[in-house]
Amino acid sequence: MGYRPRAGAGGSSPDPTSGDPTLTDGATVLLVGAGAVGGRAARQLVETPGIARLLVASRDLERAERLSTVMAPHAEPLDWKPGRPLPGGLSAIACALRTGADAAVAQAAIAAGIPIVSAGDDSVGLAGLEVLDGPARAAGVLVAAGAGLAPGLADVLARHASDALEHVDEVGVARFGAGGEACVASSRRARRERPAEVRDGLLVPTKRTGHELVWFPDPVGAQECQLVAPGVALLQHAFPDAQRVSVRMAEPEARSWWQWPRKADAESWGALRVEVWGRRGRLREVLVYGVIERTAIAAGAVLGVTAAALAGALPGLLLPEVGTHGLGEIVAARAFLAELAGRGVKAAVFEGVPVA
């Protein structure tokens, strides 16, 4: 099932222009953010059958113009910022912005009745979307939060594992890698903030503990990771019966002094390790999934596929929900992973067996 804005949703100009999405057949998606992750999401969207047009907005209009030129003829820049009317005829909005900036975009989407997905992965941004759950439900709008690497793809893998079990009692996620400068800053901030985890079914802040050595798929291999807070609440909502939920994150790769000004390498590796403990019959077992991919590519693919599903171009990937939800609550996991695999982003059981 896809998502469409209610009739009359969105703002409009009195006079149609060449940039008016109502002039085309098929779905129109607004992408807000043209950085490393946004650029990869744009590629996924313009290559999706059923997406007729992609509008690209950015705080830096020149960056939006450059990205639109690369994605031509199916993309064009849009000079839009939160606080301005949204163009009419939008099917969905995809957001790839810095910390907390996505909440203002989500508010505009809710007011216009347009489903929105955000790739934001920091505590401030995720909390800002969570408080919009009530308004989103009242408006009948889905706000998909944390649609990147982790949260995002990690939640989809956890849901896939849970579908194979009768009961889930523990979920553990570990992440390595960051795609783009904003993502690097978010990762470092998460490691400085007070961590949180679910213990005995309750979400609680916890003391910063020592690093834990986590084995990721090659070529990343073993990395020291520490507990963080971002993404834990989304996993708890998705798996309310789990007695323990934790997210660990590795330190983003250091930059050498000669790379000044420091810019994140959008092509650097990212990796996930997702462990789900549960029961099948009388047996307690663990399923361990791994992912290795360029960080921005993986996060952009998750954002792009989710936006295309919200727009109705990829039916059957999302459940018909309203309100604010993480992907672990709303995905048809096997179908979602199969779609990602077809686009080159593949996950496997840690022994190397494909999961979709």
Image (tube, grey):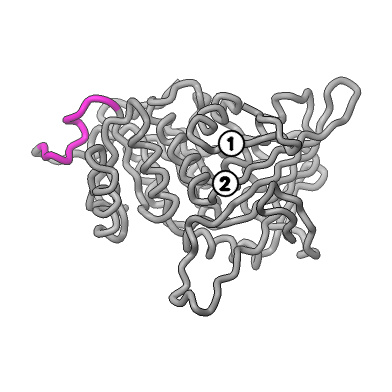
Relative horizontal placement of residue 117, taking residue 85 as reference (left or right): right
| Residue 293 badge | 2
Q: Which residues are magenta?
A: 16-26
User: Relative to the observer, which residue lies in front, 124 or 309?
Assistant: 309
Q: Residue at x 89, y 26 (%)?
A: 283
User: Relative to the observer, which residue lies in front, 232 or 191?
Assistant: 191
Counting from the top left corner in percent of width and height, residue 34 is at: 35, 53
Relative vertical location of residue 66 with respect to residue 264 in this rendering, above or below: above
Q: Residue at x 25, y 59 (%)?
A: 62
Counting from the top left corner in percent of width and height, residue 335 is at: 55, 24
| Residue 126 badge | none
Pick whichever of labels 2 and 1 is earlier in the sequence.
Answer: 2
Whether label 2 touches label 1, CB < 8 Å: yes
Q: Residue furthest right?
A: 282
Q: Is residue 108 magenta?
A: no
Q: Quadrant of the C terminus?
A: top right
User: Relative to the observer, which residue lies in front, 62 or 217?
Assistant: 217
Amino acid of disc 1: Lys
Assess disc 2: are there few (<14), some (14-19) or many (≥20) residues with their C-alpha within 10 Å of its C-alpha: many
Q: Secondary structure at mark 2?
A: strand
Q: Secondary structure at mark 1?
A: loop
Q: Residue furthest bottom?
A: 257
Amino acid of disc 2: Glu
Q: Residue at x 39, y 52 (%)?
A: 104
- According to the picture, the residue beneath numbered tag 1 turns out to be 346
Principal secondary structure, stretch drawn in magenta: loop
